Amino acid sequence: MTPENPNPLPSIIPEKDWKKIQRMLSKRSLWMVHFCTGCGAMEMPPTMTSRYDMERFGIIPMATPRQADLLLVTGYVAVKTLKRIVRVYEQMQDPKYVIAFGSCPINGGIYWDSYNTIKRLDKYIPVDMYIAGCMPRPEAIMDAFLKLMKDIDEGRADGWLRYKKYYEKYKANQRRVFKRWDE
Amino acid sequence: MNAVGIFKELGIEYEEMKVKGNKDPRYRAKVDPEKLEDIILKFKNNGFRHFVALSCVDWIKEGNMELIYHLFSYDNLEDVFLSIYLPRDQPKYKSLRHLFPQIETYEREIHEMFGVEFEGNDRLGEFILEDWEDMPPMRKDFDTEKYAKEKYGSVPLVEEGGEKE
């Protein structure tokens, strides 16, 4: 999948080990894009601030998607919101990770029969980690962050690669729920 | 002038409503759609300067759409609900946004959610919903569960697995 590197590294470190080092470094500096949907955003302030303090794991909120590598979908996803989520997700640079938060992105939650919310988020964008619950407490969020860091370290958080591989399929699914991109 | 005085002067039948835990007087009246504009103007000139909301009820069995104009007076702390009934199959009414500008937004919402046409409001169009092609979703004959199952349940899963780094 990854193209041939035009400027290969000196052969002191083999390519495979170098990737391992990259993963080890990137898991300790997750920047989270400040994009809040639904009610779960309410759990983020205590997670960010001194009570739970996610910064001790190297996770900080970041205002722009281009500088971030972690996207939290914090609650129900309306069709209108999904369009924005896809836009934000596509603006983020590789490698990028998605955490879906609460029951609603898993199966719709209490909006299971709503005409305007999508039911499963991973039909439209790849999701690396789900946190179940309504609402998940900050402890659960911290747990998910640690598990995601472990997944990144072991190379299992590969949602961004799946998005590249099945890009056409994801796009086709997205086009089934919204028609236009111009607004 | 309080609400009872205005109702008596205009000769409108009204009923008093009781709400648990709220002692402020509130009145409800069914009025003629032709006369509604003058009645709202009369209330507006007599202290009912706050237009609270415009809501819509779909009475599917009676075949009616009810529009409820909700006014409030800060002088007497009184609520007044003025309701009109429109035929359900072709609900059409004139826009009253010249009386209170905020009515425009309510009319846009009711147009989108219930399909009521407001003549004279040129901003009716796509408002909250995006890319909506079905019937207005707040109508009682819209089956939201069936719609959700058909639209979102039919989207296929993208293949699991994928490449490893």
Image: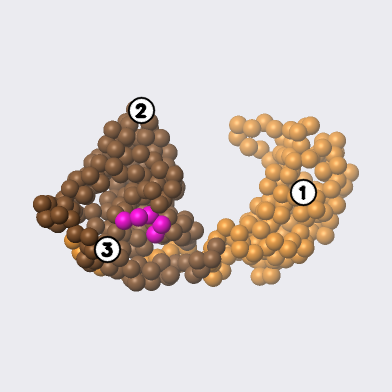
Chain colours: A brown, B orange
Residue B128 location, quadrant: bottom right
Part of the protein shown in magenta: A90-94
Q: Residue at left 76%, top 37%?
A: B73
Relative to B91, A68 lies left or right: left
Q: Which mark is residue B133?
A: none
Circles 2 and 1: CB atoms closer than 8 Å: no
Q: Quadrant of the C terminus of chain B?
A: bottom left
Q: Amino acid at mark 1?
A: Phe
Q: Residue at left 35%, top 35%?
A: A47
Q: Which mark is residue A162?
A: 3
* Residue position marked by numbered label 2 in the rendering: A50
Q: CA distance from mark 2 to mark 1?
A: 47 Å
Residue B107 location, quadrant: bottom right
Rendered location of residue A128, percent (x, y): 27, 53
Number of numbered labels in the structure image: 3
Q: Nearer the viewer, residue A67 or B20?
A: A67
Chain for disc number 3: A
Q: Amino acid at mark 2?
A: Ser
Element on which disc 2 rests: loop
Q: Which-is-in-front pick, marks 3 and 1?
A: 3
Rendered location of residue B46, percent (x, y): 85, 39
Same chain for mark 3 and mark 1? The answer is no
Q: CA distance from mark 3 to mark 1?
A: 53 Å
Chain for disc number 2: A
Rendered location of residue A66, percent (x, y): 40, 52
Q: Amino acid at mark 3?
A: Arg
Tell me if residue A49 comes above or below residue B106 in the rendering: above
Element on which disc 3 rests: helix
Q: Quick check: can you spot residue A7? A: yes
**What crowding class fits label 2: few (fewer than 14 Cα within 10 Å), some (14-19), or many (20 or more)?**
few
* Residue position marked by numbered label 1 in the rendering: B100
